[in-house]
Image (cartoon, rainbow, N blue to C red):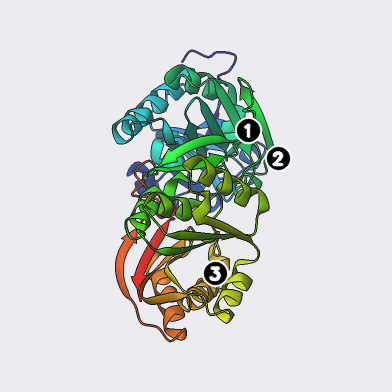
Amino acid sequence: MTQTPDTPAITATVRLTPKGDARAIRHGFPWVFANELVTDRRTRNLTAGTLAVLEDADRRPMGVVAVTPASKIICRMLDRDPEAVIDEAWFAARISRALKLRDTLYADPFYRLIHAEADGLPGVVIDRFGDVAVVQPNAAWADVLITPLVAALQKVTGVTTVVMNGTGRARSLEGLDEVTKVLAGVAPDGPVPAVMNGATYMADVMEGQKTGLFYDQRPNHAFAASLSKDARVLDVFSHVGGFGLAALAGGAKSVLAVDGSAPALDLAEKGAAAMGVSARFETRKGDAFAVLTDLAEAGETFDVVICDPPAFAPSKNALDAGLRAYERVARLAAALVAEGGILGLCSCSHAADLTKFRNASARGIGRAGRRGQIVYTGFAGPDHPMLPHLAESGYLKSVFFRL
């Protein structure tokens, strides 16, 4: 193996316990949990992000992993070749393969380029906005190897600016600091416009939520837009205008976008202005539950109501409370849907699977005294591929009811 200054030598070896699920890992499962690994003092003292060769309980090499001793996910599989060199060329090969899929899917370079484990870069998310890429290194190994990662990203894609967004719950679980900085090029001097489904979105890649835009909802935005011609639309938890701007592109008569973030709503208004539809677009800042209640008390109704809240159930421990929150959203929103209208409900909680989320939504609709028929079930777009072995990669659910 040839090492470079940016390629740490793989000198460590870690081993599964006899109870470790070697077969699952050989069949493609990308993680080793802490209770599956022999965690002697040597292993516990490894620096977070250390590359090591993983062996099964019989000391047969299984591949190269990244080790984070303090994490519940103690190892992430990087390459099933124990001789692999994790260098710039290795990153370039992974990014090139991911880029080929996105070039097939989309005419313009606005998409999720790397979706973590499903694209062979565990814990790494990269969203592309034309010549700008935002990298979320949510695992310690990616922080350690950020230099060859960025070099490969620029070489393969030609992006001129690379921003690191090191914020969020995933990094805290790895013991990583929160930091946002420019790794290559020059920071954009304002929000970056991105066009999806005929709508223009303004992505704040430096200070916005996550990478600045949620590409995952693209197909669900398109379905909502197809129902919105001449409709009065309510977009709750709208962020930078997600469903609302798509509805306007689909010919909506009017859109009211509700969110708790004034900066997000300002970006939504800028998107509407760029589309030339400001006259049909209104925003309201406030707590979503309070606004839904106020609208109902005012006797307001809409032809299409869509709620896309944050993850109410980010973990199994939060599942019951999260499902109650989804039920409450459905109950309050259903009261605002005109007879024969559409209610779209979304969840990005991987702990709440589709059945649990759908059932909670149906309970909420029933508690509002309404009945619904499901007309559409959607998931994340194809630039957010799912790893079949990892249920967590299928986090997004979208269910549309006709009431």
Which amino acid does the dot numbered 1 rest on?
Gly
Going from N to C along the chain, the mark reached first, 2 or 3, is: 2
Q: CA distance from mark 1 to mark 2?
A: 25 Å
Q: CA distance from mark 2 to mark 3?
A: 27 Å
Q: Nearer the viewer, mark 2 or mark 3?
A: 3
Q: Hey, which quadrant is residue 103 in on the image?
A: top left
Residue 212 in the image, given as x and y percentages of width and height: 56, 42
Viewed as shown, does residue 368 lie left or right of 102? right
Residue that carries the numbered disc 2 in the rendered image: 177
Residue drawn at 30 percent across, 63 percent down: 376
Q: Is residue 228 above or below residue 211?
A: below
Which amino acid does the dot numbered 3 rest on?
Gly
Residue 63 in the image, given as x and y percentages of width and height: 42, 33
Q: SS at mark 1?
A: loop
Check disc 3: other Cα within 10 Å, few if <14, some if 14-19, many if 20+: many
Residue 165 in the image, given as x and y percentages of width and height: 62, 37
Q: Is residue 191 above or below residue 187?
A: below
